[in-house]
Amino acid sequence: MKIATAQQMREMDRAAIQERGIASTLLMENAARAVARAAVSVAEARPERPGRPRRAVCFCGAGNNGGDGVAAARFLMEAGMEVRAVLVGRREKMTSDCREMERRLEAKGGSLEDFTPDDPDFACWCLEADVMVDALFGIGLNTPLRGDPLMAVQMMNTCDIPVVSADIASGVEADTGRVLGDAVQADVTVTFSLPKAGHFLGEGGLRTGRLTVAEIGIPLDLVLWTESNFYSVCENDVYLPRRERDAYKGNFGRDYILGGSVGYTGAPVLAARAAVRAGAGLVSVGVPEPIWPVVAMKLDEAMPSPLPAGKTGMLSLEATEQILARMNSSDVCLIGPGLGRGNGVASVVRHLLRSAHTAVILDADGINALEGHIDVLEARRGVVTILTPHDGEFLRLGGDLSSGDRLAAARSFAQEHGCCLVLKGHRTITAFPDGSAYVNTTGNPGMAKGGSGDVLGGIILALLGQGMSCREAVPMAVWLHGRAGDLCAEEIGEYGMTPGDLIERLPRVLRECEGKIRELGPQ
Ligand SMILES: NC(=O)C1=CN([C@@H]2O[C@H](COP(=O)(O)OP(=O)(O)OC[C@H]3O[C@@H](n4cnc5c(N)ncnc54)[C@H](O)[C@@H]3O)[C@@H](O)[C@H]2O)[C@@H](O)CC1
Ligand SMILES: [K+]
């Protein structure tokens, strides 16, 4: 799904209001109705208190986000709830739409009171609430919170009552996910028209809670034609390549994995199993000769072959030509899982990258081989090269995370080096050389275990081998990997789940996607 910047949202709102004649108050009421609906369902999930209706407190700023909150208060009253709406900000600063919503609230017998954090009666009332609506700031936030807004945020965060945020958790900067001063910890965020980067990136990704995107009446063409090159990958965006009735194994990829060393036998095995489970046609695995018997014992469906090794149990230079021949007869290669770190191995990898014209995914020690030699990627301009570093590997490659802006860092690396970069972590970012980027929405901390990356490498390999383009395959593979992790977490918990458990769940994850099969796009 496309992600909009604050500026793009403002432009969409402006065009809807000024060029299409849609009343701004109508957009606001539609937004507020979606927020109120979410608040009702959150409140109804709480235990009933016999003898009194459910309660909601709406914290409203003086801007249009506050207007959403004031209108939501009216809808919540109409839904039979006991509601208090408080203005956290100066009355003279209220926007005209926010004032209009106050008038409409008063016409229904409600009122917008001043925020009185020191009033014990107000605090007690809040403690008995079933839901809090956070409508302090939306995309207009531009300075760190202090004074009353900061107090209101702290109150929402300490009351232990579910919070529904209008548009974005107040305190989160919409375009970056940075927290300015402090920010609401939302349970649910209802955003409007399109999600914003701040719902996914940085601290904002942690403050958002469950995100829903409400359509508020902005004409669809304005939403569709908003030019953005940043996307989130959600369930609706995922699809699989068609498997034709008369297909044979060669149609689904001749995939080659180069990995393993003495002490790291598991990594290439996990990658190979994941590739097979993700639909690969033929998976070959090249490993150093000393570990070949172990790897061969573990793999039934993939084809392991031994390669010349040095004394350390890692690949030797002698293996280079043999590997190159395998690579050139494959559709796609994964280089790195468990290869080990050593000068010899690193120079083999660099030689392969310079000489092979096959699409390559570089992971783990394959990435480490580029440390200080990133110029090798120059030789691969125009050939698909995918790097899948976690933060440590990214820094070793010369990536810069000092600004805390992972999106910008991933984008500039991919553009500078002409590769696809998968910056792994919470909300993995996939960036392409043309500046476009995708943020993933699946996954959990149970996946932060050795071997998870090998599984991801195998899934990317399999999807590319099945004919998906790099742009299709990589964000999709990241999503599937995270979804498999989420199934594991649901079923066996984050502590005990293993990378092997991810592989076991891949068939179910793919099954879930079977209704969404597509003809593949241009390569
Ligand atoms: N027609 C529209 O433009 C619509 C706007 N909507 C809502 O309006 C929001 C945007 O409204 P606004 O542009 O009024 O902006 P906000 O309501 O997000 O913020 C209000 C104002 O607060 C001030 N401010 C920023 N940071 C502050 C801080 N730390 N402390 C104190 N004051 C601060 C700024 O001057 C800003 O303009 C959206 O997020 C959305 O919730 C929706 O109602 C849909 C329609
Ligand atoms: K908000």
Image: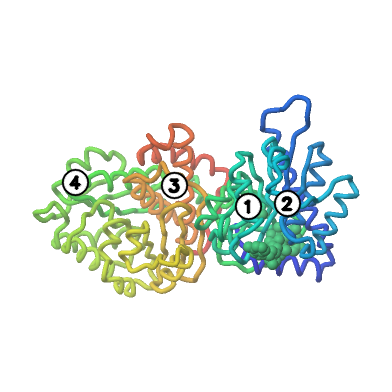
Residue behind mark 1: 151
| Upstream in sequence: badge 1 or badge 2 | 2
If the image is split into quadrants, where does the N terminus sit?
bottom right
Q: Are marks 1 and 2 in contact (CB under 8 Å)?
A: yes
Q: Position of residue 254 (x, y in %)?
A: 34, 53
Task: Please tell me whether mark 1 or mark 4 is closer to you in this view.
Answer: 1
Give the amino acid at mark 1.
Met
- Residue in the foreground of this view, choosing between 479 and 389: 389
What scheme was used to colour the molecule? rainbow
Residue behind mark 4: 263
Instruction: Name the element at disc 1.
Output: helix
Give the amino acid at mark 3.
His
| Residue at image point 22% right, 43% down | 295
Q: Is residue 458 left or right of residue 64?
A: left
Give the amino acid at mark 2.
Phe
Task: Report, in whole angstroms, how far the alpha carbon at label 4 lies from the one at label 3.
Answer: 25 Å
Task: Report, in whole angstroms, how far the alpha carbon at label 1 lies from the one at label 2.
Answer: 10 Å
Q: Is residue 437 left or right of residue 399?
A: right
Residue behind mark 2: 115
Residue 331 in sight here: no
Instruction: Name the element at disc 3.
Output: helix
| Residue at image point 26% right, 54% down | 258
Q: Position of residue 60 (x, y in %)?
A: 73, 53
Task: Report, in whole angstroms, how far the alpha carbon at label 1 lies from the one at label 4.
Answer: 54 Å
The quarter of the image that holds ligand 2 is bottom right
Residue behind mark 3: 481
Q: Are marks 3 and 1 in contact (CB under 8 Å)?
A: no
Task: Please tell me whether mark 4 or mark 2 is closer to you in this view.
Answer: 2
Task: Report, in whole angstroms, how far the alpha carbon at label 3 lies from the one at label 1.
Answer: 40 Å
